[in-house]
């Protein structure tokens, strides 16, 4: 039986087929892969989103989150900082950066 996440992913695929440069669909697809624990597939989707929208702070945040989940803290920190540079009031990115910088993570 297919779940709601799989159905959502099908919708994102359809959106990408219709509009191949639709960055939000790639971000949502990446978040879905992250939820499934498929971190490399998630990263690939976020990189596609960034390719089409280099100034998309949400894409960098999501990429940072997946890298954090992969325990790649230096890269996660880099992408959180990029998200904050693009959107200085991005509270979620600031909170995640603070978490990634905690000594217990190093």
Image (cartoon, grey):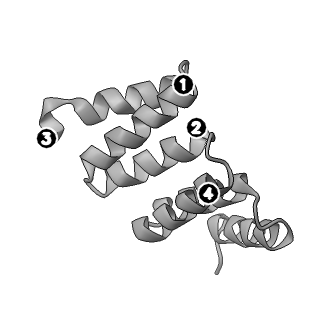
Nearer mark to the viewer, of 4 and 1: 4
Query: Residue beneath label 3, please?
Result: 106
Please determine whether, in this image, residue 84 is positioned above or below residue 27. Answer: above
Find the distance from the CA under tag 1 to the CA under tag 3: 24 Å
Find the distance from the CA under tag 2 to the CA under tag 1: 8 Å
Q: Position of residue 77 (x, y in %)?
A: 33, 39
Nearer mark to the viewer, of 2 and 1: 2
Q: Residues within 10 Å of mark 3 (few under 14, many from 20)?
A: few
> Hey, which quadrant is residue 76 in on the image?
top left
Location of the N terminus by quadrant is: bottom right
Say which mark, if any, is on residue 57.
Answer: 2
Find the distance from the CA under tag 3 to the CA under tag 2: 25 Å
Q: Which numbered disc, 4 or 1, marks the residue that appears first in the sequence?
A: 4
Please determine whether, in this image, residue 64 is positioned above or below residue 101. Answer: below
Judged from the image, the secondary structure of the residue bearing numbered disc 4 is: helix
**Residue at the bottom extreme of this rendering:** 1
Whether residues under marks 3 and 2 lie with C-beta atoms below 8 angstroms apart, the answer is no
Whether residues under marks 2 and 1 lie with C-beta atoms below 8 angstroms apart, the answer is yes
Q: What residue lies at 42% left-to-right and 25% top-to-bottom?
A: 94
Nearer mark to the viewer, of 4 and 2: 4
Q: Residues within 10 Å of mark 1 (few under 14, many from 20)?
A: some
Location of the C terminus by quadrant is: top left
Q: Is residue 61 left or right of residue 8?
A: left
Tag count: 4
Say which mark, if any, is on residue 51.
Answer: 4
Query: Residue beneath label 1, please?
Result: 90
> Hey, which quadrant is residue 102 in on the image?
top left
Whether residues under marks 4 and 2 lie with C-beta atoms below 8 angstroms apart, the answer is no
Q: Which numbered disc, 1 or 3, marks the residue that appears first in the sequence?
A: 1
Q: Position of residue 16 (x, y in %)?
A: 76, 68
């Amino acid at each position: 039986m297919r779940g709601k996440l799989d159905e959502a992913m099908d919708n994102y695929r359809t959106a990408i087929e219709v509009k191949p440069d639709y960055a939000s669909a790639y971000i949502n697809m990446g978040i879905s892969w992250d939820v499934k624990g498929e971190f490399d597939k998630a990263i690939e989707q976020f990189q596609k989103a960034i390719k089409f929208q280099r100034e998309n702070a949400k894409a960098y945040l999501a990429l940072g989150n997946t890298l954090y989940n992969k325990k790649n803290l230096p890269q996660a920190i880099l992408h959180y900082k990029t998200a904050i540079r693009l959107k200085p009031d991005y509270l979620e990115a600031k909170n995640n950066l603070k978490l990634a910088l905690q000594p217990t993570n190093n």
